[in-house]
Amino acid sequence: SAVISQKPSRDICQRGTSLTIQCQVDSQVTMMFWYRQQPGQSLTLIATANQGSEATYESGFVIDKFPISRPNLTFSTLTVSNMSPEDSSIYLCSVEDAQASTYEQYFGPGTRLTVT
Amino acid sequence: GIQVEQSPPDLILQEGANSTLRCNFSDSVNNLQWFHQNPWGQLINLFYIPSGTKQNGRLSATTVATERYSLLYISSSQTTDSGVYFCAADFAGGTSYGKLTFGQGTILTVHP
């Protein structure tokens, strides 16, 4: 299975600032996904990040607020812009395991963001 | 719309007890996964099971795709089984490829 790392693991940020979260995979993958988990809630997909193309955002999420980069097949970043306390969440990236002939997805350890 | 519903929302067990968690989904799926989220927030893959039955130690899962439900069985529960269990589905067709829709989770607490 793919091994995924995220940086930072946690951060406390002031409102109005921005934070960029990195996601690194140990193998090349076509599709990477970014999810948000608000406190006490389930996970919600923010966007799909494909290498060489614009990210595809889900309803309720916009590029100006959550810009995403996907410069190569092993790396992606998600920026949370102009943060407010409502952005306090765990942000997780996931990938489909390209080594397997299934759709199974694996998740990074998450970035726990607190906005004050 | 596309929905994944889990039950029960909360479950409290004594160590050694068995339990069954249920996941209902609203449409055909390419992917159906069960995860355990530990207290540090990490999602641990339990089963990839769009159909059929699988077992891994004390855990097993069954998905009946034609009836659109999946069950996760935990036998001889241990305190380390505590946490949140999520079911997530990638629905077939349309433009939903690879996008997991999560249920609301079952919070499991196992007391010693």
Image: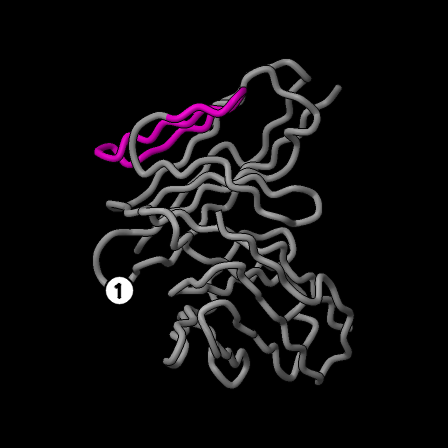
Q: How is the image coloured?
A: one colour
B64 relative to A108 in the view: left or right: left
Chain ID for label 1?
B
Q: Nearer the viewer, residue A7 or B111?
A: A7
The quadrant in which residue B110 appears is top right
Q: From the viewer's perspective, is B25 left or right of A48?
A: left
- Residue range (magenta): B54-72
- Which residue lies at the image location 44% right of the left edge and 69% below the top edge? A73
Quarter of the image for residue A87 reads bottom right
Labels in figure, total: 1
Question: Is residue B68 in the magenta section?
Answer: yes
Q: Is residue A36 left or right of residue A99?
A: right
Amino acid type, label 1: Thr
Q: x%, y% of residue A75?
A: 52, 70
At 44% across and 23% down in the image, what residue appears?
B55
Q: Residue at x 57, y 65 (%)?
A: A24
Residue A54 colored in magenta in the image: no
Q: Secondary structure at mark 1?
A: loop
Residue at (49, 67) in percent of width and height? A74
- Give the vertical position of B76 relative to B87 (above or below): above
**Residue for badge 1:** B95
Specify whether B6 is left or right of B82: left
Residue A38 pos. (x, y %): 61, 59
B39 versus A85 height, above or below? above
